[in-house]
Image (cartoon, rainbow, N blue to C red):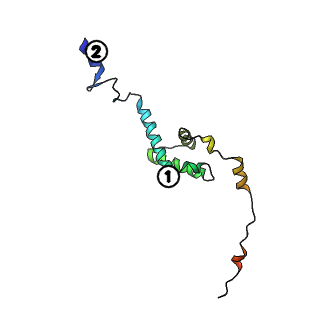
Amino acid sequence: MASGGGREEEQDGMSVHSPCKAPPSSASSLRKVELELKLLEALAIYPPAKLRGIHRHFVLYGLMEYLQRSFGRQFSPSDVLKLLDRFYDLEMLKPDDEDGEILNQEEDFCLPQSYFVKEDS
């Protein structure tokens, strides 16, 4: 009976409790790690600093496309933002009210007078 108990704890020459052998439920955690790695690769192309400015929608779309091509499945903007929230404080990336005011300011545009002066040769 002692050999039967030892057989239960060994599979393919490894102990069931061996740290080298991944637990059965780690397949989802492996996919999670792979997803995080792909997101970090995408951030090399689409920098997170631009998520704060007027380009934030384009950067978010680029991150979505990168992940969709990498994994062959759809990602929503909220999926990508949830992934980003693991690495960054997304509250800091939200636009300030001042940013909106600056973008909505209108100024009259006119060309400088030097543009209209013809050079005599």
Residue 117 x/y as whole percent: 71, 80
Quick one: SS at disc 2? Answer: helix
> Is label 1 in contact with label 2 (beta carbons under 8 Å)?
no
Name the residue furthest bottom.
121
Is residue 50 shown above or below 113? above
Residue depicted at 41% across the width and 30% down the height:
26
| Camera-nearest label, 1 or 2 | 1
Q: Observer-nearest residue: 47 or 62?
A: 47
Residue depicted at 28% across the width and 22% down the height:
10
Amino acid carrying label 2: it is Gly
The residue under label 2 is 5
Q: In which quadrant is the N terminus drawn?
A: top left
The residue under label 1 is 45
Amino acid carrying label 1: it is Ile
Residue depicted at 54% across the width and 50% down the height:
47
Q: Observer-nearest residue: 28 or 3?
A: 3
Q: In which quadrant is the C terminus drawn?
A: bottom right
Quick one: SS at disc 1? Answer: helix
Residue 16 x/y as whole percent: 33, 23
Residue depicted at 59% across the width and 48% down the height:
51
| Quadrant of residue 34 within the rendered picture | top left
Residue 18 x/y as whole percent: 33, 26
Mark 1 to mark 2: distance in Å? 54 Å
Work out whether residue 60 can be spotted: no
Residue 41 x/y as whole percent: 46, 47
> In the picture provided, is 66 more to the left or to the right than 18?
right
> In the picture provided, is 52 more to the left or to the right than 47?
right
| Quadrant of residue 78 within the rendered picture | top right
Work out whether residue 99 can be spotted: yes
Pick whichever of labels 1 and 2 is earlier in the sequence: 2
